[in-house]
Amino acid sequence: MKPTTAAAKLGIYLPAAPEEFQRSSISRADLDALRADPPAWLVELRHNGPFPKDVVAQKLGVSRSGLVRAGITQPLTATEIGELLADPPEWLVQERETQRAVVAEKARQKAAHEA
């Protein structure tokens, strides 16, 4: 698979990965090996980032669209995410409320459909 796909499956920001990973094709066996016994660089990226948008959105409890509305277009590190969570700006509070409402509505619709 392409490095972009492998990075997405590993939850890492591809430009922060080593050059060798960025340029090589990754087999499913290679991906499984990276998951089973991650090298130091992968452990570091997963722990400290920078993180791709989908991971940032998950850690902040917002949607990717919410990040864009807030002007967050670059990957964030664990420290930056921690700072946002420690003292949430107004946009983060608003987007988290929006995300909770969307999730609640989806759950309501699913329950209504199942009934």
Image (tube, rainbow, N blue to C red):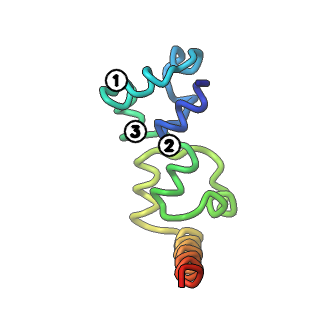
- Circle nearer the N terminus (3, 2): 3
Q: Which residue is mark 2?
A: 51
Horizontally, residue 66 falls left or right of residue 85, namely right
Taking the spot 57% from the left edge, 84% from the top edge, the residue there is 112
Q: Which residue is mark 1?
A: 39
- Circle nearer the N terminus (2, 1): 1
Give the x, y percent position of residue 55: 50, 49
Horizontally, residue 95 falls left or right of residue 28, namely right
- Circle nearer the N terminus (1, 3): 1
Question: How many neighbours does mark 1 have within 10 angstroms: few (below 14), some (14-19), or many (20 or more)?
Answer: few
The amino acid at mark 1 is Pro
Question: How many neighbours does mark 2 have within 10 angstroms: few (below 14), some (14-19), or many (20 or more)?
Answer: many
Asked whether residue 18 is in view, the answer is yes
Give the x, y percent position of residue 66: 63, 63
Label placed on residue 46 = 3
Label placed on residue 94 = none
